[in-house]
Image (cartoon, rainbow, N blue to C red):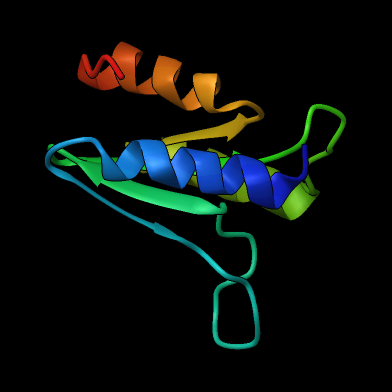
Amino acid sequence: MLEKDITAAIMRVLKMVPRCFTWEEHGGMYGTAGIPDVICRLDGRFFAFEVKTPDGSVTKLRERTIHRIKVAGGHAYVVRPVDDVKAVLWAHAGIDI
């Protein structure tokens, strides 16, 4: 499965969650380098998901950004299958998808 397929599956799941505002972050010259692929605001909580294939690796810049989000009180994770996102939402927001 490609990273874009995993991201699409995650977006489909998040769009079904009530009170969830989410978007897919696209890199480029107008974006901020290092921002995770999927951003989500759910019931006042900030979530960021860096999507990777099972054998994909995370850059140092993304690792630092994930750390900075956590230090600021947000939830940020590297996720591989959509089930990782479901587990995060269950653990931190009590959302069962």
Does any portion of residue 23 appear in the rendered image?
Answer: yes
Total marks drawn? Answer: 0
Query: Is 57 on the left-hand or right-hand side of 43?
Result: right
Residue 56, by quadrant, is top right
On the image, the x and y values in percent for residue 69 come to 45, 44
Rendered position, 37 above or below 26: above
Residue at (54%, 32%) from the top-left corner?
A: 77
| Most distant residue in the right direction | 55
Query: Is 60 on the left-hand or right-hand side of 33?
Result: right
Please name whichever residue, 53 or 91, is drawn nearer the observer in this view of the structure.
Answer: 53
Residue 78, by quadrant, is top right
Rendered position, 76 above or below 39: above
On the image, the x and y values in percent for residue 9 come to 52, 40
Residue at (68%, 42%) from the top-left corner?
A: 63
Residue 55, by quadrant, is top right
Does any portion of residue 74 appear in the rendered image?
Answer: no
Residue at (55%, 39%) from the top-left corner?
A: 67
On the image, the x and y values in percent for residue 57 come to 83, 38
Point out the image quarter for the C terminus: top left
On the image, the x and y values in percent for residue 25 come to 51, 64
Residue at (77%, 44%) from the top-left corner?
A: 2
Please name whichever residue, 60 or 85, is drawn nearer the observer in this view of the structure.
Answer: 85
Please name whichever residue, 72 or 12, is drawn nearer the observer in this view of the structure.
Answer: 12
Rendered position, 82 above or below 33: above
Point out the image quarter for the N terminus: top right
